[in-house]
Image (tube, coloured by chain):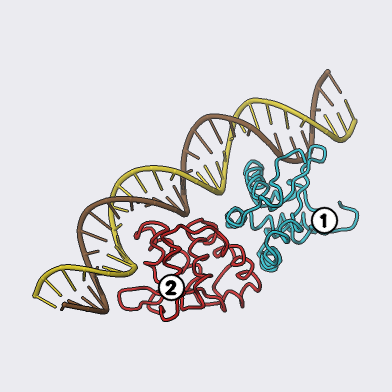
Chain colours: A red, B cyan, C yellow, D brown
Amino acid sequence: MSLPHPETDQITLPNVLAALGDDTRLAIIGCLARCDASGGLVCGQFSGLTSKTNLTYHVAKLREAGVINVRPEGTKRRVTLRRDDLDQRFPGFLDSVIATAIDLPVVETTMRELESATKPGSA
Amino acid sequence: MSLPHPETDQITLPNVLAALGDDTRLAIIGCLARCDASGGLVCGQFSGLTSKTNLTYHVAKLREAGVINVRPEGTKRRVTLRRDDLDQRFPGFLDSVIATAIDLPVVETTMRELESATKPGSA
DNA sequence: GCATTAGTTCAATATCCATTGAACAAGATA
DNA sequence: TATCTTGTTCAATGGATATTGAACTAATGC
């Protein structure tokens, strides 16, 4: 964990809601919801959503709010949902968000990334 | 319902999250969560939160996102949570938000309003 | 060592969003 | 009718937030 992440008990609802109240970031969460079981995703796999620079910005927002975990992996950054932490802090919240976010439309470029990510042996 | 409210199936998660991702609006929801059983609140009872003008703005945001219902009552506006609609659309979501929002600190002026609102015969 | 890949930093801009005050409208009350 | 209460509208402002491109760093592979 070389990047700063808030402790579980420092995650606040206002921050989480503000972080999720953005289309780009909600799309990131939707993608993660689909692929989290297969080890999460790396930043590059969100490339269909927006520019590389902008992605850095939005991923940082989600990380700082405590919604995701970002772990360096070589030159890449592996992104996962902080499911347990959020469940502990706001029971039922993440599940209800994911249930809807997972159905949000995804651009085709990103869709292909997700498909290859969920294939066995891709993590 | 003289003011425009979205139909239940037009309420979207991105809009709801964006509406709740603001401290003033989350405070309004917290107040409503305490008092909704006793018939909701009128705008004036949120006066401790911000200015009158600004309140109109935030209440409109919540109404347009489908989070609250606003019903004219003489010169007043009665505000209630759209519990059933939100539960139907995003099961578990509102409950998990309220469970936390109800514990958020409330300014004293507003606190007094809430106390008088929950007294029997005040609705 | 050199090029490639993956992501970051920084400064600039653009856009959106919250906040304010003055003037207004509508209903209640006398 | 005059006045008070409650909330709205509008235009203006300030501040935050998203987006961009250029230059950069760090790890990987040849």
Type of amino acid under label 2: Ala
> For the residues tagged 1 and 2, is the chain the same?
no
Query: Can you give x and y, in whole percent of width and height, for residue A26 in the image?
Result: 52, 61
Judge by depth and name the residue closer to the eye, A70 or A51.
A51
Q: Which residue is mark 2?
A: A117
Kindly state the secondary structure of the residue where label 2 is placed.
Answer: helix
Residue drawn 91% across the image and 54% down it: B121
Q: Is residue A50 above or below residue B60?
A: below
Q: Is residue A42 left or right of residue B110?
A: left
* Image point (46%, 78%), residue name: A39
Residue at which label 1 appears:
B116
Asked if residue A5 can be seen in this view, the reply is no
User: Could one spot residue A83 in this view of the protein?
Assistant: yes
Q: Secondary structure at mark 1?
A: helix
Q: Residue at x 82, y 41 (%)?
A: B73
**Label 2: few (<14), some (14–19) or many (≥20) C-alpha neighbours in 10 Å:** many
Q: Chain of mark 1?
A: B
Position of residue B106 measured from the top left corner of the image (x, y, whole percent): 68, 60
Position of residue B10 measured from the top left corner of the image (x, y, whole percent): 66, 50
